[in-house]
Amino acid sequence: MRIDPVSLRLFVAVMEEGTIAAAAQREHIAPAAVSRRISELESSLGTALFERSNKGTLATPAAHVLLGLARDVLHGLDDLSEQMAGFASGVRGHVRVSANISAITQFLPQHLRSFMALAPAVQVHLQERISTQVARAVADSTADIGILNAGHYGEGEALVQLPYRQDELVVVVPRGHALARRRAVSFREALAFDFVGLHPGSAINDLLHRGASEAGLPLRLRMQVTSYDALSLMVDAGMGIGVMPRGSARLYLPALKVRAVTLQEPWALRQLVLAVRSLEALSPAAHMLVDHLQSPDQPEI
């Protein structure tokens, strides 16, 4: 059985885009050529990958299994090509990193800067996602390394999680707020006020809802935003109070009229981890980055 990598790439495009027409547009090829490649792939594998009807194509169970295998194969070919090209160009590969906003705002700028100084021939591609999406990206082989909050993430259960850094959640309040002079506050006390929250699905949003449920009190979410800078600006404008990592809050405190108050809850101390599918399967460049990020001597913001 001989399988053409081009056919695999077109198959992945169809699965990701949902239709042959959309996949053809993405790959800059005629839809008829994509359809022919898919048919040849089905013939080589001896199984149907799509059920065809006048309403379009529907992926079979075999197609979903093949999707993960095809991504692994294509990623391996890309790594092989780039690392071999490195002998001529000096580039020794690239590493795809998916990280949550807490890691990006608190630790990664300094850590990646020191890594790039150590390994200037390695390209690092960074994408921000929420923790659940980070786990999925690593499990699907669309990221080599994930940085996320420690926890259980369904399809990411088989991932290897390695300690990275700890962070601390604090309550951010306007300077004139009733809590502004407090050194510390419990979440139950904070629930008496309106909140500016982060978007649904974020780890902090889930913690706030869980904490309110355990306290038996409502979480008064006045609005939800998608970033720490937006949250800080809304708190500064008096729209409510918020919760974010202390290291992230330090970025905004000097420019805004807000204060960070210690949150007296066990869940306010969190563990960030590095997630990989397998240490043994990492490229040399990715393995080097994992080792660098785990080093306790890295500078912090």
Image (cartoon, rainbow, N blue to C red):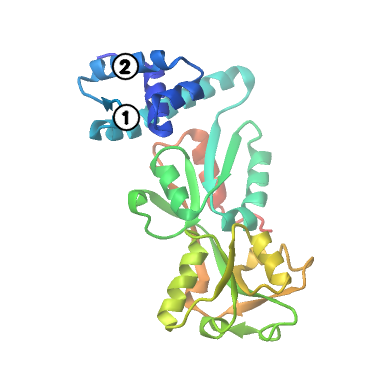
Q: Which residue is mark 2?
A: 3
Tell me which label, 1 or 2, sits earlier in the chain.
2
Could one spot residue 239 in this view of the protein?
yes
Q: From the viewer's side, name the closer residue of 164 and 203.
A: 203
Point out which mark residue 295 bears: none
Q: From the viewer's side, name the closer residue of 250 and 18.
A: 18
Inspect the image, locate mark 1, and give the three-letter code of the amino acid beneath it. Lys
Q: Which residue is mark 1?
A: 55
Q: Secondary structure at mark 2?
A: loop
Task: Determine the residue positioned at 37% across, 50% down.
Answer: 156
Q: Is residue 132 left or right of residue 111?
A: left
Pinpoint residue 68: horizontal percent, then vertical percent. 34, 34
Task: Determine the residue positioned at 32% across, 29% down.
Answer: 55
Is 106 situated above or below 76? below
Could one spot residue 273 in this view of the protein?
no
Inspect the image, locate mark 2, and give the three-letter code of the amino acid beneath it. Ile
Spot the residue most to the front. 54
Give the quadrant of the C terminus: bottom right
Q: Mark 1, residues whose alpha carbon is within 10 Å: few (<14), some, or many (≥20)?
A: few
Q: Are marks 1 and 2 in contact (CB under 8 Å)?
A: no
Numbered disc total: 2
Task: Determine the residue positioned at 55% across, 32% down.
Answer: 94
Q: Which quadrant would residue 124 be assigned to in this image?
A: top right
Q: Which quadrant would residue 14 be assigned to in this image?
A: top left
Q: Secondary structure at mark 1?
A: loop
Q: CA distance from mark 1 to mark 2?
A: 28 Å
Q: Mark 2, residues whose alpha carbon is within 10 Å: few (<14), some, or many (≥20)?
A: few
Task: Determine the residue positioned at 75% across, 82% down.
Answer: 176
Pinpoint residue 256: horizontal percent, then vertical percent. 77, 68
Spot the residue most to the left. 46
Is 17 situated above or below 246? above
